[in-house]
Image (cartoon, rainbow, N blue to C red):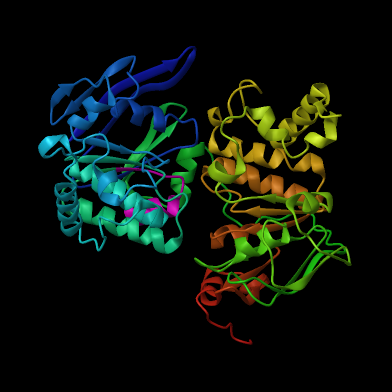
Amino acid sequence: MISMKNITKSFGSNKVLKDVSITINNGEICALIGENGAGKSTLMNILGGVYQMDSGEIFIDGEKVEFTTPADSLNSGIAFIHQELNLINDLPIFENMFLGRELIGKRGRLDLEKMMEETEAIFKEMNLDLDPKTMVRDLDASYKQIVEICRAIMMDASIIIMDEPTTSLTEPEIKRVFQMMKTLKEHGVGIIFISHKLNEVMEICERYMVLRDGKLVAEGQVEDVTTDDLARFMVGYNVRTDRLTRDKKIGDEILRVENLTHSHAFRDISLSVRKGEILGLTGLLGDGRSELFQSIFGADEVLSGRIFLAGQEVKIQSTEQALELGIGYVPRNRKENGIIKDMNIIENASIVTWPLFANKGVIDQNKQLGLFENQKQKLGIKLQRITDNINTLSGGNQQKVVLAKWLPANPKILILDNPTQGVDVGAKEEIYDIILKLAEDGMAVVVLSSEAQEIIRLCDRALVMYHGEIQGEVSGSTMTEHDIMKLATGGILDAS
């Protein structure tokens, strides 16, 4: 058992943790939840030896310990699997398993055979059918997570901290990781599960701990609460779960595609979206929705079909042309495709619209600042300094910055691919309000999402894709999780 007692931590004048006490037992899966900035990562970084606490105590099985480095924590049986996985794509699995602690054989050479044998033994113990010689780049995201978990087990971890492990995973991949977590639990390993996905907390965890503003505000058994309860603990008020409404003024058709076909991702797609409308697209793994709208945005080619904007046929051959025609696109996977990690906040927020305030290649910084300040107020972006690195912001505020770089371009249609991926429940509601306001102001909005509840709450109607084709449309009384899942798995809705 690990016990953290009366932990406090400040960064300068900002008190991040205020007298927090938690316990984690071997053989249990315990959720640690809270909004971005609540102190979750700081608390776990103290347990992982990355940060040192200002005051407080840590006990393992009743014995007081001190962690001054990550190695101290790891040597005590605590493994921290971060959201950005520490794997090298160009190495095979077994070499990744031994990174930093390679086995050396005779004559000082790597004992590759021994490393493969030990990797195979761990996989066998965990009931995994994986070839240790497989290159990491050939694994899907869930198996990369599983390799990280197995590496932690190989280092005799009795407690594993998993930070947002399902953020970039599809539904089948999530199930695979959850099965692995259940296997770990059966082997007596304790897991601290950090997540914003409350439905996953309800599914996989036994116990929960909630941080808000640096304090532990609630804890207990998951079976005794609902997702609404957990959301209320996180933000301090009741979070809306009902269908969202707005002043609808659906106007003329903005986008229409006819019989659009890709080399492999989608075929014979026809759809339209109108001014002021929020159109949803959803489905399961491999449904082709992202590739479809990447093609409409000029980031990929199509074999055949036609695209119309405001009734005029267009041939979009580049993203620059799409932007000029009034199409905006916020991609999925913010960390890889939405932000540029080496740039600061204002640079990330204005990169799309640099031509609007550049003269002969020189940026008018006053105009750039004025546009960003306007978006900052509209979107409610919370930050310290505009020149801080984008990574200093919470996930929700990063996503708002990604939106901020598109809105000054005044697109006629805005495509949002998984717009609330990796943001907490409070920030998610704020982003929903922003989307509703954009539609109210006459923008056509397309929301691509794997979350049926998001589609149901936000969209006027939704198209459900299955294996690269539109399987059906839902709206009104058919806008239910049951009907969406039926279509997403190849079924057909009853005519009634």
- Front in this rendered view, residue 302 or 78: 302
- View extreme (left): residue: 106
Question: Where residue 131 sits in the image (x, y, percent)?
Answer: 26, 60
**Res 289 visible:** yes
Question: Where residue 64 sits in the image (x, y, percent)?
Answer: 16, 22
- View extreme (top): residue: 13
Please tell me which residue is depicted at 27% across the width and 45% down the height of the picture. Answer: 95
- Locate residue 469 relative to residue 439 in the image: left or right: left
Where residue 212 sits, quadrant-wise, is top left
> Magenta segment range?
192-205
Q: In this rendering, is residue 356 above or below 204?
A: above
Where residue 23 sits, quadrant-wise, is top left
Q: In this rendering, is residue 184 above or below 255?
A: above
Please tell me which residue is depicted at 54% across the width and 33% down the height of the picture. Answer: 394
- Front in this rendered view, residue 348 or 211: 348
**197 drawn magenta:** yes
- Locate residue 432 relative to residue 149 in the image: left or right: right
